[in-house]
Image (cartoon, grey):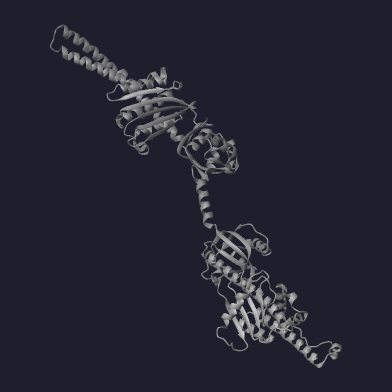
């Protein structure tokens, strides 16, 4: 039975190796396990002479011997053991009666382009010791390059050669028979045997090359997957057949033997059995399966969330399912911690996505319009949803940015774009149902390949803090005005009385030509200077022109009085387009300018100060610039009560304050107040 099976395999190889047309039907019968006796038709045979009868019997026996040699050679070629080329050549030589049988192998790689390999069987010992050199010379003479023809070639009167050429035209070498008594026409069976064995040998080499390539491919695959950090599992009919080290670590096993052969379903929870089995059946049937998430149970009972990507492959010659597991456990835990943090935090968190990214080189105004057209709120927490007027994040997620203009104002987006897609600690005021609401906003954009694709942001409401600052500034202003009134009504009147009494005394002493006349006149001058100083302090604490006149006149007077100081040049510039009616706004802007000038004089040691008041689109911009020693804005804001007060005043009127300075390069303090007093509405 084993012999019949091997012969059927041989038939399959010959059939698939395009050699069927060269093998006689008698040979196929022998290869398939049948038996044949040498016989000829009796009527014709009886008519032959005894000599011819002997020749016919001899030819029939030689054909049977050749066909038997084909079967035996095929057994060697399809057997599990490595091919014994010497045994194959000996079998060929004994079947044909050849004096020598050669196999000349040509190199299969460019590195050995000039090197041939020789396997030779001799019936008798060669007469010359360097017979292989003579053989190589003859081979190179007749075949300077590999031939594309695969028929038997008569190279000389006693040499038959056939190229060993596969069906894919892959050239392996030459198979040759050398006879001692020439090549009569009667040696057709030997030529046929040589041709059949050449084809079988080419098929064998093809199979060996394929097997070698497969082993090398599997070895490269093993070397690759052994080093990959992703767990890789191979399963055949729900059984594990291979795991890389990452896969063993994922399942909590120390050795591969602890896992191979076990059912894959042993590592999944029972509620996932049906889904996993269904996906495996689809993969084994050759269908594609999209990646899906599942939970893996380790040896120690710990559950790991993984994303499973699978595909059918061939491993060690059999079809298996290759699974790549991406461990998502830590990421899922981090996401859950983030969601828990977002749920409990008092800040508003949000993310805006763009359906179509916008180039960073686009004009800012066009970018703002693009954000409204293609932007949408991808996600936010409950705090942000409440600020946007929604009951929960799901109610507002996915809404176009255009429908959320009441929070994401054009001015806010324009400033975000102009500052390079980064805002840190920016303060904004928005009108709400219960009046103005104040927020500190941070935002950063994600830019990929010079295109803005999304915006992350957070905001915290500081309405209570701003209201507290407002009340503090109002209290401070009220105290200053009270002090001013006390100086004006109390100390000022006393100084006026002292001046008047001193003048009267000085006139009387002068009339009497008293020696104390000059002293009395000094008292008059001192009293007059003190009264003027009190009036100046009163005007600084309570600038009456702010309530009756324009802010421009108050700033002009501030610049004039500052310019009168020794060693100081101070001027005021305006475009004449600023007109503010709100007394509170005028007062706070004046106080900001006043404090900036005082800082330039006392701390910056400036010699030149410039006050400017201009209209910038929808804003009024007040700036004070000096050429002093400069400051560090962050440190100064933390340490200086004056700078903090300026920030408070700017927020009180709904404006913003910016300080631009570097040590040794002077300082510019700018306050921007939106026309109408409602920031973010333009």
Query: Hey, which quadrant is residue 604 in on the image?
Result: top left
**Above-or-below relation of 393 to 495:** below
Q: Residue at x 16, y 9 (%)?
A: 509
Relative to the observer, which residue lies in front, 459 or 21? 21
**Above-or-below relation of 38 to 496:** below
Relative to the observer, which residue lies in front, 239 or 39? 39
**Above-or-below relation of 283 to 662:** below
Furthest residue in direction right, as rendered: 43
Query: Hey, which quadrant is residue 132 in on the image?
Result: bottom right
Query: Hey, which quadrant is residue 45 in on the image?
Result: bottom right
Q: Position of residue 150 (x, y in %)?
A: 68, 73
Q: Residue at x 68, y 70 (%)?
A: 167
Furthest residue in direction left, as rendered: 515
Q: Give the total of numbered labels.
A: 0
Q: Position of residue 382 (x, y in %)?
A: 54, 43
Q: Is 346 placed left or right of 238 in the picture?
A: left
**Above-or-below relation of 498 to 466:** above
Furthest residue in direction top, as rendered: 511
Q: Quadrant of the N terminus?
A: bottom right
Q: Position of residue 421 (x, y in %)?
A: 49, 40
Query: Is residue 392 among what the camera can see?
Result: no
Furthest residue in direction bottom, as rendered: 50
Relative to the observer, which residue lies in front, 542 or 104? 104
Query: Is residue 613 among what the camera can see?
Result: yes
Q: Position of residue 472 (x, y in %)?
A: 39, 30
Q: Is 15 placed left or right of 173 in the picture?
A: right
Q: Is 654 placed left or right of 207 in the picture?
A: left
Q: Is 596 placed left or right of 29 in the picture?
A: left
């Amino acid at each position: 039975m084993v012999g019949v099976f091997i012969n059927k395999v041989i038939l399959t190889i010959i059939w698939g190796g395009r050699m069927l047309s060269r093998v006689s039907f008698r040979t196929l019968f022998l290869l398939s396990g049948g038996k044949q006796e040498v016989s000829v038709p009796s009527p014709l045979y009886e008519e032959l002479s005894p000599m011819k009868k002997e020749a016919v019997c001899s030819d029939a026996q030689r054909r049977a011997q050749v066909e038997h040699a084909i079967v035996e050679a095929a057994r060697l070629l399809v057997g599990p053991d490595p091919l014994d080329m010497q045994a194959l050549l000996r079998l060929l030589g004994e079947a044909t009666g050849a004096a020598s049988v050669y196999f000349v192998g040509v190199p299969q790689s460019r590195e050995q382009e000039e090197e041939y390999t020789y396997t030779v069987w001799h019936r008798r010992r060669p007469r010359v010791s360097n017979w292989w050199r003579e053989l190589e010379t003859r081979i190179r003479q007749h075949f300077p390059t590999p031939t594309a023809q695969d028929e038997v070639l008569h190279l000389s009167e006693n040499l038959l050669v056939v190229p060993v050429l596969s069906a894919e035209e892959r050239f392996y070498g030459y198979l040759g028979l050398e006879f001692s008594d020439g090549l009569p026409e009667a040696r057709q069976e030997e030529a046929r045997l040589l041709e059949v064995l050449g084809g079988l040998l080419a098929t064998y080499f093809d199979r060996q090359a394929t097997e070698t390539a497969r082993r090398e491919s599997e070895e490269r695959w093993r070397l690759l997957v052994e080093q990959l950090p992703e767990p890789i599992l191979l399963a055949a009919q729900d059984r594990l057949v291979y795991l890389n080290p990452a896969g063993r670590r994922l399942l909590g096993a120390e050795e591969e033997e602890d896992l191979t052969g076990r059912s894959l379903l042993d590592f999944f929870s029972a509620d996932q059995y049906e889904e996993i089995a269904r996906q495996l059946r689809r993969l084994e049937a050759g269908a594609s399966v999209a990646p899906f998430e599942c939970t893996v149970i380790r040896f120690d009972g710990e559950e790991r969330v993984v994303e499973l990507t699978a595909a059918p492959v061939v491993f060690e010659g059999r079809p298996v399912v290759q699974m790549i597991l991406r461990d998502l456990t830590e990421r899922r835990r981090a996401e859950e911690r983030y969601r828990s943090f977002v749920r409990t935090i008092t800040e508003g968190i949000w993310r805006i996505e763009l359906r179509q990214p916008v180039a960073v080189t686009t004009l800012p105004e066009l970018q703002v319009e693009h954000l409204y057209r293609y932007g949408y709120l991808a996600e936010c927490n409950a705090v942000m949803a409440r600020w946007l007027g929604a009951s929960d994040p799901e109610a507002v997620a996915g809404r176009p940015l255009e429908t959320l203009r009441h929070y994401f104002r054009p001015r806010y987006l324009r400033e975000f774009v102009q500052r390079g897609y980064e805002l840190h600690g920016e303060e904004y005021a928005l009108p709400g149902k219960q009046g103005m609401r104040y927020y500190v906003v941070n935002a950063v954009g994600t830019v990929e390949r010079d295109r803005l694709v999304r915006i992350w942001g957070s905001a915290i409401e500081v309405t209570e803090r701003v209201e507290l600052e407002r009340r503090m500034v109002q209290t401070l202003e009220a105290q200053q005005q009270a002090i001013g009134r006390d100086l004006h009504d109390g100390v000022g009147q006393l100084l006026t009385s002292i001046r008047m009494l001193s003048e009267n005394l000085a006139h009387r002493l002068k009339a009497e030509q008293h020696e104390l006349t000059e002293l009395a006149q000094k008292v008059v001058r001192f009293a007059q200077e003190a009264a003027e100083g009190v009036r100046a302090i009163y005007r600084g604490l309570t600038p009456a022109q702010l309530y009756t006149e324009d802010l421009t006149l108050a700033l002009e007077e501030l610049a004039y009085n500052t310019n009168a100081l020794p060693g100081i040049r101070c001027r005021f510039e305006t475009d004449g387009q600023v007109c503010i009616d709100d007394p509170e706004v005028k007062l706070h802007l004046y106080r900001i300018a006043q404090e900036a000038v005082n800082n330039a004089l006392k701390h910056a040691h400036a010699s030149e100060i410039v006050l400017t008041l201009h209209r910038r689109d929808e804003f009024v911009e007040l700036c004070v610039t000096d050429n002093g020693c400069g400051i560090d804005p962050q440190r100064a804001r933390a340490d200086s009560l004056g700078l903090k007060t300026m920030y408070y005043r700017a927020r009180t009127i709904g404006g913003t304050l910016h300080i631009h300075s570097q040590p040794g390069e002077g300082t510019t303090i700018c306050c921007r107040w939106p026309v109408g007093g409602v920031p973010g509405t333009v």
